[in-house]
Amino acid sequence: MLEPKEIAELAVKALDEKKGKDIRMLHIEAQSTLADYFVICNGTSTTQVRALADAVEEILDKAGEQPHHVEGHRGGQWTLMDYSSVVIHIFTEEGREFYSLERLWSDAEQVDISALLKTDDTAK
């Protein structure tokens, strides 16, 4: 069984592999009992949002982790993947702007994930 940070890091790597945009990892443990980490990113289309979610599910499944709940996968605007201690949010660009999770959780610690990314896309 993986530690929450390891789950979040694997999710970041999977999202990066599939060219997820503006990937963020927030440590929210001090702000909420919902989870320890949020991983947030967006895709360029509903098709890419689905592909990103599939990539996360595949890499975590190989590591022995199953989601407790997945929501929004069919709609394609926002997919929420709940791994208990880690919640992964994958949006379209419009969905991410609308929900603005980074603003809502602005008091959470933003984790430096640059070492996990093959190409540094955090500034885009």
Image (spheres, helix red, strand yellow):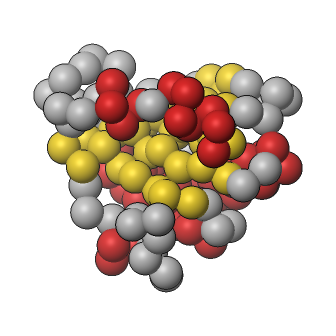
Taking depth in this image into account, of 71 and 119 the one nearest to the observer is: 119
**Residue at 73% from the left image edge and 33% from the top image edge:** 77
x and y percentages locating residue 14 in the rendered image: 59, 63
Occupied quadrant, residue 86: top left
**Residue at 33% from the left image edge and 31% from the top image edge:** 103
Q: Residue furthest top?
A: 33
x and y percentages locating residue 94 in the rendered image: 65, 37
Residue 3 shows in this picture: no
x and y percentages locating residue 61 in the rendered image: 65, 51
**Total count of labels:** 0
Taking depth in this image into account, of 58 and 117 the one nearest to the observer is: 117
**Residue at 45% from the left image edge and 31% from the top image edge:** 100
Q: Is residue 66 above or below residue 16?
A: above
Q: Is residue 50 left or right of residue 27?
A: right
Q: Residue furthest bottom?
A: 118
Residue 111 shows in this picture: yes
Q: Is residue 26 left or right of residue 10?
A: left
Q: Is residue 26 above or below residue 76?
A: below
x and y percentages locating residue 73 in the rendered image: 77, 32
Q: Is residue 14 left or right of residue 7?
A: right
**Residue at 33% from the left image edge and 25% from the top image edge:** 104
